[in-house]
Image: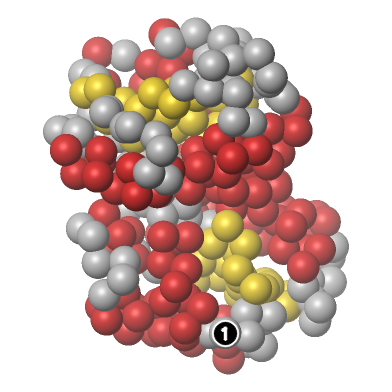
Amino acid sequence: MPIGVFDSGLGGLCALKELHRILPDADLVYFGDTGRTPYGTRSPETIMKYAAQDARFLLSRNVRAMLIACGTVSTVALNALKISLPVPVFGVVSAASREAAKATENGKIGVMGTGATISSGVFEHELKLINGSLEVTSVACPLLVPVVEYGFADDEIAYLSVKRYLQPVIDAGADTVILGCTHFPLLIKMLKKAAPHITFVDSGAAAAREIAAAFPDKNGSGAVHCCVSDTPSNFNKTARVFLGGELEIKAERVEIEKY
Ligand code: DGL
């Protein structure tokens, strides 16, 4: 039985890639809600509704565990999904917070996420639970998701945007930043250029390592099946680049509103 991974769009591919790297034999099913992205600008009620449909779709594909490779859903809907779903569910918050708390040398951590994620305060809460003396600076970065989704991750637009959003974190003296939105690791080149002294924690990859440790699999066929809610062509191109040339990605289009 496969492990299911979902995101509001492309960002969760970073987590999928890490999961496939660690468990090359595991069968994986990915759903990217490309037709309704972004989630991060929407109300908690809408995010919950979309997340429940995404999860029901993956359940229909018989997944044995689920990774929410989306910072917004992980911060807004994780507990509701954990209670209502019949399979184990993992989000990105706890794994990324643990990695950041371990990585920081000066106890100052930044969190970058969507508006919904930052307003939820969930990363800050988790970090304080791990270590009450951590200083956390959180920044909502709404421009970054469209920059990635529209293919500008390697463009000067991306550099100027990340530089601007990193400023409060740099001013606060953070040495570690959680990329609390799973789209942001696609901007890693620009993030490192803008702040070479900062350690960036990829929240989706951290969560992938967590679920891989809990559900190792050596008996699958290593199949990676991708599904999207909008036309697959752009997604196929990006997914192929992301997952490495050896995987042929042909995403299936799904009517997500039916779930
Ligand atoms: N994948 C979402 C997240 O990690 C970002 C994109 C969106 O706003 O839907 O928060």
Describe the element under mark 1 as helix, strand or loop: loop
Q: x, y percentage for residue 178?
A: 60, 64
Q: Nearer the viewer, residue 112 or 66?
A: 66
Specify the farthest residue to the bottom.
Answer: 171
**Residue drawn 63% across the image and 56% down it:** 123
Which amino acid lies under the numbered mark 1 shown in the image of this protein? Pro
Query: In the picture, residue 251 is in which quadrant?
Result: top left
Question: What residue would you read off at disc 1?
Answer: 196
* Residue 45 shows in the view: no
The picture places residue 198, in percent across and down from the top left corner, at 62, 79
Q: Is residue 106 something one can see in this rendering? A: yes
Relative to 130, is 106 above or below? below
Relative to 147, does residue 78 appear above or below in the rendering? above
- Depth order, front residue of 202/75: 202
Instruction: Give the residue drawn at x 59%, y 48%.
Output: 205
Can you say whether 93 is above or below 155 in the image? Answer: above
How many dots with numbers? Answer: 1
Q: Position of residue 9 (x, y in %)?
A: 33, 42
The image quadrant where one finds the C terminus is: top left
* The N terminus: image quadrant: top right
Task: Give the left or right position of residue 118, taking residue 122 as reference.
Answer: left
* Location of residue 47 by image quarter: top left
Image point 41% across, 67% down: which residue? 187
Vertically, is 60 above or below 92? above
Horizontally, residue 228 falls left or right of residue 75, namely left
| Mark 1 CB near ligand 1 (8 Å cut) | no
- Residue in the foreground of this view, choosing between 162 and 72: 162
Colour setting: secondary structure
Q: Residue 215: x percent and y percent?
A: 71, 24
Corner quadrant of residue 211: top right
The residue at the point 47 percent across, 83 percent down is 193
What is the crowding at mark 1: few (fewer than 14 residues within 10 Å), some, or many (at least 20)?
few
